[in-house]
Amino acid sequence: MPTATITQTSLHFTAGPPMELHGRARRRAVPIICPAPADVRATPWRAVEIAGAYTFLGRDNLSSPSTPLTETPRHKAIVSVMAGPFARIRGMVSVDVEAGRETLNEGGHYYDVPSFAVVNAKVSWNVAGRFEVDLSGLNLTDRDYWVVDGYPESGRVVRLSASWRF
């Protein structure tokens, strides 16, 4: 039977150097959905789960309106589909989207970080009992993006790993 749940969660985004704020600031979240980030999960079929999360973060520097608050995105969304069609094999595909981040570089200049979307995937094979092999791909579209000026994120990464649980 299909199921769906909506829950509140806490998502934390960190990037770049630590930021100190001396003064007052105001933060606004998504009042339409809930006062904090929203997480939605649905199981339309027995072996498939679809999940999504969205965060809106509006912030204002009340003590110094001309000084922007940096290092956090205004919009962040994650959508994923997980499936386990066979007893020992399961997979996951996700898309991470971010927009509205402003950053302060080491030279003291403010920059608007371009919006981006990143596609990731993983396939896990339970070979025997406690032995598992994973093949994962991060940034599969090989998108050039950054969240802090001067520090680009990784390009396409493919990883093969094996694990033994004991």
Image: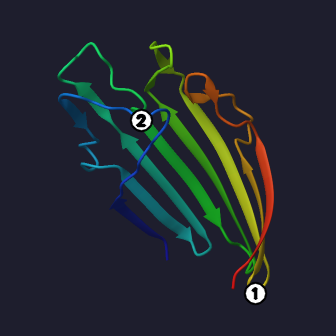
Label 2 CA crowd tier, 10 Å (few <14, some 14–19, many 20+): few
Helix or strand or loop: what does disc 2 sit on?
A: loop
On screen, residue 5 versus residue 82, left or right, reads left
Q: Which residue corresponds to mark 1?
A: 129
On screen, residue 78 versus residue 136, left or right, reads left
Mark 2 to mark 1 CA distance (whole Å):
44 Å
The answer to which quarter of the image holds residue 47 is: bottom right
Helix or strand or loop: what does disc 1 sit on?
A: loop
Who's the residue at 17% across and 21% down the image? 63
Q: Position of residue 89 (x, y in %)?
A: 75, 73
Q: Position of residue 152 (x, y in %)?
A: 65, 29
On screen, residue 36 versus residue 139, left or right, reads left
| Numbered-mark total | 2
Residue 131, above or below 21: below
Who's the residue at 40% across and 51% down the image? 11
Q: Which residue corresponds to mark 2?
A: 18
Can you say which quadrant of the picture contains the C terminus? bottom right
What colour-coding does the image apply? rainbow
Who's the residue at 27% across and 30% down the image? 21
Of residues 43 and 88, which is closer to you in this image?
88
On screen, residue 161 versus residue 70, left or right, reads right
